[in-house]
């Protein structure tokens, strides 16, 4: 099994697609560090501490998974954690351009940190936190997209 990898993201909120990628990464890497970005520019619905708590609960039964928050450049955080791999998810072709641009920028900032792309199971390939927030605001049943405690928190937050 390979070394530690960092799966960075906003996770606002965590979805079954995120959890699927964490499980896939867990099969490849000895440690998966799920790094929740504070990222106030994205104007997240949930504060970083709540997003971390939801992810910890969602991954509690997974061995070798650590959930933490971080601020700043992900490559700097990777150096701090002595991780050489970043994991990014590709759902649809539309994700590729942005993710490719980010991977090349990270490579330019730090040539010793590599980005690996993983694809979620096809049943999660269309999921996005943004779409789920919209659906939740309209009262949709989200039980097939997020854990029940996430759906409850999302609907309470949007009330």
Image (cartoon, rainbow, N blue to C red):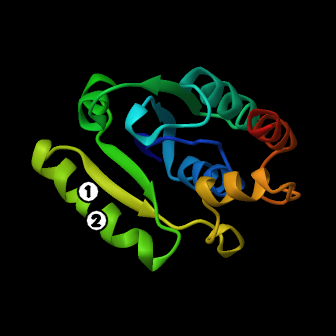
- Which residue is denoted by mark 1 in the rendering? 103
At which x and y percent is residue 70? 41, 25
Residue 144 falls in image quadrant: bottom right
106 vs 30: above or below: below
Residue shown at 74% from the left, 33% from the top? 157
Circle 2 packing at 10 Å, graded few (<14), some (14-19), many (20+), is: some
Residue shown at 50% from the left, 41% from the top? 10
141 horizontally vs 122: left or right = right
- Which residue is denoted by mark 2 in the rendering? 100
At which x and y percent is residue 18? 61, 51
Task: Report, in whole angstroms, how far the alpha carbon at label 1 lies from the one at label 2.
Answer: 5 Å
Residue 77 falls in image quadrant: top left
At which x and y percent is residue 85? 33, 46
Q: Are marks 1 and 2 in contact (CB under 8 Å)?
A: yes
15 horizontally vs 36: left or right = right
Identify the element where label 1 is drawn: helix
82 horizontally vs 144: left or right = left
87 horizontally vs 56: left or right = left
13 vs 88: above or below: above
Circle 1 packing at 10 Å, graded few (<14), some (14-19), many (20+), is: many
Give 137 or 55, whichever is nearer the viewer.
137
At which x and y percent is residue 16? 71, 54
Residue shown at 51% from the left, 25% from the top? 68
């Amino acid at each position: 099994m390979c070394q530690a990898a960092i799966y960075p993201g906003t996770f606002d909120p965590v979805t079954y697609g995120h959890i699927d990628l964490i499980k896939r990464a867990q099969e490849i890497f000895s440690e998966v560090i799920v790094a929740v970005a504070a990222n106030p520019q994205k104007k997240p619905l949930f504060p970083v501490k709540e997003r971390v708590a939801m992810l910890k609960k969602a991954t509690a039964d997974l061995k070798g998974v650590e959930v933490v928050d971080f601020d700043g450049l992900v490559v700097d955080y990777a150096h701090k954690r002595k991780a050489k791999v970043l994991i990014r998810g590709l759902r649809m072709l539309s994700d590729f351009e942005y993710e490719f641009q980010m991977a090349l920028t990270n490579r330019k900032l730090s040539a010793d940190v590599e980005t690996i792309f993983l694809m979620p199971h096809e049943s999660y390939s269309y999921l996005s936190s943004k779409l789920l927030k919209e659906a939740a605001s309209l009262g949709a049943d989200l039980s097939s997209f997020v854990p029940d405690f996430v759906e409850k928190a999302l609907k309470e937050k949007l009330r």
